[in-house]
Amino acid sequence: MFVLGIESSCDETAAAIVNNGNLLSSVIASQIKDHSAYGGVVPEIASRKHIEAVSAVISQATEDAGIALSVVEGIAVTRGPGLIGSLLVGLSAAKALAYGLNIPLVGVNHLEGHIMASFLAEKKPGFPFAALVVSGGHTNVYLVKNYHEFKLLGQTRDDAAGEAFDKAAKLLNLGYPGGVVIDRMAKKGNHSAFEFPRAMKDSPDFSFSGLKTSLLTMVKKLGGHFTQAQLEDIAASYQEAIVDVLVDKTIKAALDHHVSQVVVCGGVAANSRLRERFVKAVAGKNLELFIPPTILCTDNAAMIAVLGEIMLKNGRSDSLDLNAVSRWP
Ligand code: KG4
Ligand code: ZN
């Protein structure tokens, strides 16, 4: 089945074509340059930029896949969670196309999409598995029983891990998006140069706000002026504190729930140290690790299309009065 996926929940306008689980094209128009001056995503700007980009991105996706739009048999679109104005742009485009082409439409949960990105690889995870979804807005561990049953095992009580990266980069004036910059700088730094807290050691839940506060306190204490080498050490130490808890709690959740497969996904799963540490953590244990390539970890429409195709094939579809939802528990 040829399925067009559309994603516009935050600051990436994306479209992709999937056919029988195979990815034929994936186009992502990033708005990073439009938001970087503000140090974060400005919702009003994001909506407008999605409107400007959405038609061209969809055309590019069909062109790259080598198919005409009329070949598309179903449309999958991110329904939420995300910025409501941004979501509405993708959803409206999806509805218009579904109506015009007279084909089914299905609304997809963005987080479920992140998890299902792992199904685009040749080697796919098998149910049940544990999944860490770690992005700009979420830090959740799930027990994934099948395509539509997700049991929440742990979540952040305050900031998401991606937020912790982004806020630290802002505080240190390193630029936006923070995760990418800190990942790059940390490669040259010493991860035990500075001490940062690892919160909620004995809980399945996460907390990152204390980490951010301890960075702020440290910056104030040291006067706010740093050499490049110091910044690299801070980046490496701060990143290590985030990575430590993400790895430890996810592995513990998998072992506690007797699953042998672990999926790590979402924008922060693009982090090179997190990937490296997860590989080390499963070694010697009866655990198999699945992390999508970095381009499928950050926001994309391929993950929406692949899950959408499965949902449509299982007879699930939505009517044209489907609405976007900013929060979707
Ligand atoms: O999944 P995503 O693209 O959008 C959301 O659904 O939120 O995740 C974006 C988050 C941002 O906080 C960004 O800083 C973080 O993912 N991120 C990274 C890296 N690349 C993106 N964090 C750490 N290391 C990276 N390499
Ligand atoms: Zn995302």
Image: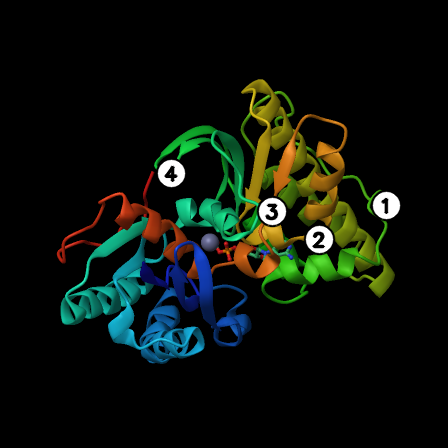
**Disc 1 versus disc 2: nearer the observer:** 2
Q: Is residue 227 visible?
A: no
Residue position for label 1: 193
Mark 3 and mark 4 residues within 8 Å of each other at the beta carbon: no
Mark 4 and mark 2 residues within 8 Å of each other at the beta carbon: no
What's the residue type where badge 2 is placed? Ser
Residue position for label 4: 147
Q: Residues within 10 Å of mark 3 (few under 14, many from 20)?
A: many
What's the residue type where badge 3 is placed? Ile
Q: Residue 116: where, in percent of width, then height?
A: 45, 46
Q: Is residue 84 above or below residue 111?
A: below
Q: Is residue 194 visible?
A: yes
Distance of mark 3 from mark 1, alpha carbons? 29 Å
Q: Is residue 171 above or below residue 315?
A: below
- Give the camera-side residue of 311 and 7: 311
Q: Quadrant of residue 97?
A: bottom left
What's the residue type where badge 4 is placed? Tyr
Q: Image quadrant of ligand 1? A: bottom right
Distance from mark 2 CB to nearest ligand 1 atom below 8 Å: yes
**Disc 4 versus disc 2: nearer the observer:** 4
Distance of mark 3 from mark 4, alpha carbons? 17 Å
Q: Which mark is residue 291?
A: 3
Residue position for label 2: 272
Q: Residue 264: where, in percent of width, then height?
A: 58, 43
Q: Is residue 101 above or below residue 303?
A: below
At horizontal 23% and vertical 45% (from top left) the residue drawn is 316
Distance of mark 1 from mark 2, alpha carbons? 19 Å
Distance of mark 4 from mark 1, alpha carbons? 43 Å
Q: Residues within 10 Å of mark 2 (few under 14, many from 20)?
A: some
Q: Is residue 280 left or right of residue 251?
A: right
Mark 4 and mark 1 residues within 8 Å of each other at the beta carbon: no
